[in-house]
Image (cartoon, rainbow, N blue to C red):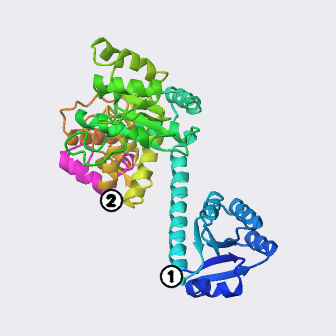
């Protein structure tokens, strides 16, 4: 705290009490004292303070009204209430009206320092939380989601409507299509946005532990349960829980989950106390639940409870207009994470990205671009940095099979660029987004020749 000076405002501190606060805080704070409520209010309206002290008396309601008004005017500033007495009703009233802490006489400098240090840390933490929440809101803003293809535009329209409701949602789609991300978009654009958002991947947790993970357990309920554990549903109370890969859970847990959805209550593993929760459920799966019902692997009644508002996400190959802007968004994200400055993709690299069928969807695209950012040393992602096992070449070329090595893909792209540019290497290099020297190296590497080149005559 000594490296930064703080602004402290104190109300109704009489001269004999000012010595303690001055001695405690003057080294790292600028302190202003006011005994008149009007001048105190003018000070609050005029300047933002880091800490506010308000002295209250049990028989004086005006000081409590001042506390309440101060909290309304400057809700993010910690207010420390002081008093000559430490009666419980006085402390409770002050805290209810928004005080951060309460100090009673004698006002010792160490006690004042400790409370102020804690208050400063609390304010810093709140600022960080507010920043992350604002940042998160931007990330999950529906209007910021890449939705250029008509099929995905319809999905976003539906999600906007569903977000304002409290009904259960089932998101289906292939792996990597963005089910987890969109569940966050629903929550952070819903009336529950200020409350917890809890994610759990049901496929990543062993079946023996999944029930405890979801509903918690009591101490001694099984070997290794040495203390009580709160489950994810309790953690999500008032908010939203996202159950990813719901098609993987056992029939036994499905039964307990059905009860939570119908009655909003459950018991912890090994316990008999009924716990009630108010939780919105968003479920997701890449499985065919209707088929699992026919095979006896998924409860039909649970399916109808989670399928109130269904959303089917199209694979990336059915969103062709989204691929390029998604690639740019993912490139910016990867560059920020790795502190690299890459402005975009070469025409050849972009052609590969736009014409590949992306069986792994957005997740595969993100991984490919992240790898390209690591490999690329220039300010543009070039063909050599795009490493994918199988892709359709530029329009008009044949399909490259998965068994062919990456070098074959490169050779075909280079031949295509040379043909389109009448075998002028300089122009072909520009088309591919690489330097003429790099192209010459590749030509020699792959043994590419042409009768019009001087070295081949």
Q: Residue at x 71, y 72 (%)?
A: 47
Q: Secondary structure at mark 2?
A: loop
Q: Is there any visible trace of residue 351 in the rendered image?
A: no
Please give the residue where the numbered disc 2 appears in the rendered image. 377
Q: Secondary structure at mark 1?
A: helix
Disc 1: CA contacts within 10 A as few (<14), some (14-19) or many (>=20): some
* Magenta stretch holds residue 441: yes
User: How far apart are the alpha carbons under marks 2 and 1?
Assistant: 56 Å
Q: Earlier in the sequence, mark 2 or mark 1?
A: 1
| Image quadrant assignment for residue 406 | top left
Indicate which disc residue 110 carries. Answer: 1
Q: Is residue 360 above or below residue 340?
A: above
Indicate which disc residue 440 carries. Answer: none
* Magenta stretch holds residue 284: no
Looking at the picture, tell me which residue is in the foreground, 160 or 8. Answer: 8
Residue 93 % position (x, y) = 65, 60
Q: Magenta stretch: give its range.
A: 430-456
Q: Is residue 343 above or below residue 57?
A: above
Looking at the picture, tell me which residue is in the foreground, 376 or 395. Answer: 376
Q: Residue at x 56, y 33 (%)?
A: 163
Residue 167 % position (x, y) = 53, 27
Disc 2: CA contacts within 10 A as few (<14), some (14-19) or many (>=20): some
Q: Nearer the viewer, mark 2 or mark 1?
A: 1
């Amino acid at each position: 705290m000594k490296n930064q000076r703080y602004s402290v405002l104190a109300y109704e501190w009489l001269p004999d009490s000012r010595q303690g606060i001055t001695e405690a805080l003057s080294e790292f704070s600028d302190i202003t004292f006011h005994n008149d409520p009007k001048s105190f209010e003018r000070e609050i309206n005029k300047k933002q303070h880091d800490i506010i002290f308000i002295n209250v008396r049990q028989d004086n309601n005006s000081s409590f009204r001042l506390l309440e008004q101060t909290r309304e005017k400057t809700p993010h500033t910690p207010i420390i209430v002081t008093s000559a007495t430490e009666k419980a009703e006085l402390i409770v009233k002050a805290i209810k009206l928004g005080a951060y802490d309460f100090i009673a006489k004698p006002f010792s400098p160490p006690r004042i320092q400790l409370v102020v240090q804690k208050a400063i840390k609390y304010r810093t933490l709140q600022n960080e939380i507010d920043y992350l929440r604002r940042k998160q809101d931007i990330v999950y803003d529906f209007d910021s989601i890449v939705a250029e293809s008509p099929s995905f535009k319809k999905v976003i329209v539906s999600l906007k409507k569903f977000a304002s409701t409290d009904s259960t949602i089932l998101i289906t789609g292939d792996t990597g299509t963005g089910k987890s991300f969109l569940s966050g978009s629903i929550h952070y654009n819903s009336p529950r946005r200020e409350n917890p958002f809890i994610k759990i991947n049901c496929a990543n947790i062993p079946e023996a532990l999944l029930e405890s993970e979801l509903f918690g357990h009591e101490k001694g309920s099984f070997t290794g349960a040495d203390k009580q554990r709160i489950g994810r549903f309790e953690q999500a109370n008032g908010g939203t829980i996202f159950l990813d890969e719901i098609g993987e859970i056992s029939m036994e847990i499905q039964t307990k989950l059905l009860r939570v959805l119908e009655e909003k209550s459950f018991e912890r593993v090994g316990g008999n106390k009924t716990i009630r929760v108010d939780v919105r459920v968003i479920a997701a799966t890449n499985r065919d639940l209707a088929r699992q019902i026919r095979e006896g692997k998924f409860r039909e009644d649970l399916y109808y409870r989670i399928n109130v508002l269904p959303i089917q996400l199209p694979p990336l190959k059915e969103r062709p207009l989204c691929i390029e802007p998604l690639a740019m968004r993912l490139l910016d994200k990867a560059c920020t994470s790795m502190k690299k400055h890459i402005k975009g993709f070469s025409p050849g690299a972009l052609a590969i990205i736009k014409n590949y069928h992306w069986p792994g969807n957005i997740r595969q695209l993100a991984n490919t671009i992240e790898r390209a950012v690591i490999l690329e040393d220039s300010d543009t992602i070039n063909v050599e940095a795009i490493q994918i096992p199988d892709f359709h070449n530029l329009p008009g070329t044949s399909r490259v099979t998965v068994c062919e090595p990456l070098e074959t893909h490169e050779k075909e792209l280079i031949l295509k660029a040379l043909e389109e540019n009448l075998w002028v290497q300089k122009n072909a290099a520009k088309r591919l987004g690489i330097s003429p020297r790099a192209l010459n190296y590749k030509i020699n590497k792959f043994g590419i020749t042409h009768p019009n080149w001087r070295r081949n005559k």
